[in-house]
Amino acid sequence: MFFVFRIIKGLIGLIFKLILLPLVLVLTIVQCVCIVAAHLSALFFNLVGGIFIVTGILSYYFELEPIDVMWRMIASGTALYILPMLVREFAVWTALIKETLMIRLLT
């Protein structure tokens, strides 16, 4: 009787592993796409975000714009500067999920 339960447990584990394998492959592809997108866009977004921040500060300093416009420009620049970091964090989370599934597949 115990032998039958071991066979059933092994079959269920095999089916579970076969179901998780495509998910691991999809997560690997998503992780690679996120890393490439983050690295390609990081330079552009950081440059534009820095320009927004510096322009906001200088426009207030030289009295070209009121302070509320300065804060909007700084907020926009900060959002543009942080965007690639958020994409990288998403890639890290997909890597963590993928590694957790890989550990589950290997045990």
Image (spheres, rainbow, N blue to C red):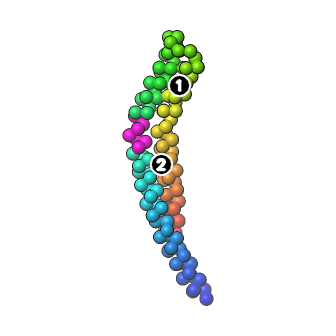
For image coordinates 44% across by 32% down, the residue present is: 46
Q: Residue furthest right?
A: 1
Q: Are marks 1 and 2 in contact (CB under 8 Å)?
A: no
Of 68 and 81, nearer the camera is: 68
Residue under label 2? 91
Q: Nearer the viewer, residue 9 or 51?
A: 51
**How far is mark 1 from mark 2, CA to CA?**
27 Å
For the residue carrying disc 1, how many other residues have a C-alpha within 10 Å: few (<14), some (14-19), or many (20+)?
many
Tell me where residue 54 appears, x and y as whole percent. Answer: 47, 21
Quadrant assignment for the N terminus: bottom right
Q: Which mark is residue 74?
A: 1
Question: Is residue 66 found inside the magenta-colored segment of the image?
Answer: no
Left/right of residue 71 with respect to residue 46 in the rendered view: right
Q: Tell me, for residue 30, which label it has, or none.
A: none
Work out which residue is located at the far bottom of the displayed protein and give it: 1
Q: Is residue 53 above or below residue 29?
A: above
For residue 53, above or below residue 13: above
Up-down: is 11 above or below 102? below
The vertical placement of 82 against 72, above or below, is below
The segment highlighted magenta reads: 37-43
Q: Give the residue drawn at x 46%, y 26%.
A: 50
Q: How many marks?
A: 2
Label 1 or label 2, whichever lies nearer to me, is 1
Q: Is residue 67 left or right of residue 85?
A: right
Residue 51 is situated, as x and y percent measured from the top left of the image, at 44, 24
What's the amino acid at mark 2?
Answer: Ala
Tell me the residue at 54%/76% (across/down): 12
Q: Secondary structure at mark 1?
A: helix
Q: Residue furthest top?
A: 63
The spot of residue 41 in percent (x, y) is 41, 38
